[in-house]
Amino acid sequence: MSSVDVVVVGSGPNGLAAAITLATAGVSVSVIEGADVPGGGCRTESLTLPGFRHDVCSAVHPLVLASPFFRQPAFDGLRHSLLQPAVPFAHPLDGGRVGAVLRSLDDTAASLGRDGAAYRRLMGPLVARSREIADQVLAPLRSVPAHPVALARFGLPGLLPARRLARRFETDEARALLAGVSAHSMAPLSAPLTGAFGLLLTMTAHSVGWPVVAGGSSTIADALVAELERLGGTIATGHWVRSLSELPPSTAVVLDTAPKGLVAMAGADLPERYRRALDRFRYGPGVCKVDWALSGPVPWSAEACRRAGTLHLGGTFDEVAASEADVHAGRHPDRPYCIVVQPGVADPGRAPGDQETLWGYCHVPSGSTVDMAAAIEAQIERFAPGFPELILARSTRTAAQEEEHNPNYVGGDIGGGAVSLGQTIARPTVRWNPYRTPLKGVYLGSASTPPGGGVHGMCGVYAARTVLHDHFGAKAPF
C-alpha cells in the first residue's frame, strides 16, 4: 500500500466511522481489515443452510438511530432500511405471562397494570428528552454536558444497580422487564450502572425502536464502506496486522482493536507503565451464540412474544440475577439468561418461504469452551413448547470460538470491556484523552474507549477528531 495520511486498522463500525470522519475532513485514509469482508460485528452470513441469512454478531440496532454519527444525510438510505418489529422487546414468564415494552410509553404503562404509574414516572421524563440524553451518553466524559438537566434525570437513577431500581415495581412482569434489559450490561444486577443499561435501552425502545436491518446487519457495513469509498478512502481486507511496522507510511494510525490487540501490535515500543495499565484492563464475560434455521415461527405461549423482535429469557428478576451472578463467579448457569432475536417478524426475507432464522446467545465465563446450545434451547422451549421440532439446523460458537473469529472479542466479550464505575471513568486507562496512546501518531478508537460498546460509531469519531486536532489543525476534539 502507498503512503496515506491516516491508516485505520479494523473495519468494525468504529473503524469505519473513524475513517469516514477523517475522509470528510479531506484527509487521505486507508482501512486494513483482517477478515475477508469488512464490518466486524456487522456481518451477515449463511451460517446454517443455503438461503438462511444470519447476523454474525450485532442484530438489533437502536443505537444506529440514536447516534449523532448516523444522522448524517449520507446514511438516510440506511436509516430507511431499518425495520421495526411491532414489539421492541418482550420477557416471557412461566404460565404464559409476559412483560412487553411497546413503542408507545402509554400503552406499555397500561399493560403493566398496577405498576403502570411507576413505569410512567420512571421512563416518561427520559423518553421526553431522549435525544438529548442519547447525545450525552454517547459523548466522552470529558465533554461539558450540553443538557445537564436531562443528563441528571438519566444519570442519577442510572448509577443504581438494577436490583435497586426494581424496588419501584411490584409485579413479576415489570421487574422481569427491568432484569432482562439491564442484563445487557453483562454485569451482576447488584452492580452499579446496571440500571443505566436498563434505562437507556428501554428509553430507545420508546423513542427510536429496536429495529433490525433489511437483509441483515451487513447492510450497515455496506453503507459505511460505500460512504468511505465515495469520499476517496480505500479498504483492504484479508490482512491481519501483526505489528505496527507492517503498516504503510502515514501521519497517524487509528486502531479499532481491543487493548490486547494494541499491545500485540506495538510490543516493546509501548512504555512499560502504559502497557501494565492495558494489561490490567478488565474484559467482561463471554457469550455462547447459537443461530438456528427453523421450519416456521417460534411457537411462543405469550402472544406478545410472537410479535417481538427481541426476547429476554430467564424467568423472574431473581432468576435472571442468579444466572448473571453464576457467570461472574465463573460458573455456567443451568438456566441461563438468554437474548433471542427473531428478525423474521420484521424482515421475512431472511429465510426461504415460510421458514425462519433465529439468533440467540447466553452469557458464560470469559474464554469458555462450553457449548450452551442445549441450555439455551431448553430456555426457549420453556416459553415456546414444541420449539425443538422446528429446528432444521444450528450453528454454535463458544466464547473461545468468538475470539478466534474476531480477536477484538477477548474471551468472547462482545462489549469491549467489563462494565464498572472505574472502567466507565477510565476506559481503557486513566488518560486525559483516552484515544491517544503514548506512541506518537497512534490512537485507539474501539469499543474499549468511551462511550463503549454498541453500533454507534462514536468511539471512532472521537478518535478521528483527536487525530484531526493533533495533526491537521482542527479544533479541539470534544
Image: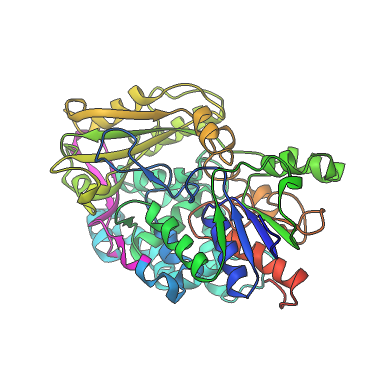
Q: Extreme left residue here?
A: 354
* Residue appearing at x 41%, y 52% in the figure: 168
Left or right? Give the position of 371 relative to 86: right
Q: Extreme right residue here?
A: 272
Task: Specify whether residue 322 is in view.
Answer: yes
**Vertical placement of residue 62 versus 145, above or below:** above
* Residue appearing at x 57%, y 65% in the figure: 233
**Vertical placement of residue 78 versus 399, above or below:** below
Q: Extreme front residue here?
A: 2
Task: Specify whether residue 280 is in view.
Answer: no
**Residue 21 sits in quarter:** bottom right
**Residue 306 sits in quarter:** top left
Residue 287 in the image: x percent, y percent? 47, 34
* Residue appearing at x 50%, y 65% in the figure: 229
Residue 42 in the image: x percent, y percent? 44, 50
217 in magenta: no
Residue 38 in the image: x percent, y percent? 49, 50
Query: In this picture, which residue range is highlighted in magenta?
Result: 78-104
**Could you tell me how many numbered marks the image carries?**
0
* Residue appearing at x 73%, y 61% in the figure: 252
Left or right? Give the position of 420 relative to 287: right
**Vertical placement of residue 182 versus 382, above or below:** below
Left or right? Give the position of 433 relative to 182: right
